[in-house]
Image (tube, helix red, strand yellow):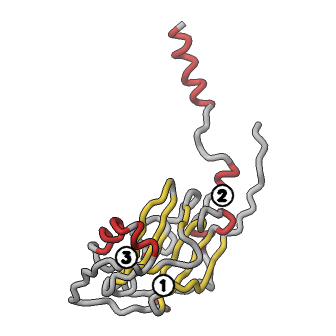
Amino acid sequence: MSVFCLLLMPAVLLGQDDGPTTAEQCRIVTAVDLFDSEAPSFRGYPAASVQGMTLTPKLDLSSNPLAKKYRTVLRQEIAKGPNYAGHYRVAVWGCGASCAMFGVVNLKTGRVITAREFATVVGTYLAADEFLSDTRGDYWGFRYANDSSLLVVLGAPDEDESRTGAYYFVLRSESLHLIHTTHVGKTCKATKPQ
């Protein structure tokens, strides 16, 4: 009996397919899906980098509701120094499977800045590592540069897959302003199981 099971097991395993279904493959967002010839460029929003200045601010807990709630991760990010728009730090932290929250910290004042449009972004079906790869951030769905005030956030805002895309923000007057959006319009046909 055990010999029969050993002979049958490879045949059973060969018939199994653990890969994504056709419908799931259609939902995957790639760099090609995010391409937009009208999207702003990082060069179009230059920012002066800070040279030789020590930036170790105290986190301003009253500047934003997230500052107090996520003070530990924000303090850890502040300690890493600037990575965006000269003297700012884009701080990103997880909020579940393929979910991220973010804020921008002014490293001169300790103030925390967040986007008004959404609080979280989900990248469950995001496979776009090569999208804007020359400005890739430390986290999968974020693109930014230390010499630019442009911040690009990729994914599904607040877990709403119908809004999946690339969101282009500019930091102006201590506020993130949404200036452009590239929505991914996929029409995936439902497939019937065989």
Residue of label 2: 27
Residue pictured at 56% horizontal, 57% vertical: 124
Check contact, mark 1 vs mark 2: CB within 8 A: no
Q: Amino acid at mark 2?
A: Arg
Q: Is residue 22 visible?
A: yes
Quarter of the image for the N terminus: give it: top right
The image quarter containing residue 66 is bottom left
Residue 105 position (above or below residue 96) = below
Marked residue nearer the N-terminal end (3 or 1):
3
Q: Nearer the viewer, residue 23 or 178?
A: 178
Q: Is residue 133 visible?
A: no
The mark closer to the camera, 1 or 2, is 1
Residue pictured at 44% horizontal, 87% vertical: 149
Q: Amino acid at mark 3?
A: Leu
Q: Amino acid at mark 1?
A: Leu
Marked residue nearer the N-terminal end (2 or 3):
2
Check contact, mark 3 vs mark 1: CB within 8 A: no
Disc 3 residue crowd, few under 14, some 14–19, many 20+, Cα 10 Å:
some
Q: Which mark is residue 150?
A: 1
The secondary element bearing badge 3 is classed as loop
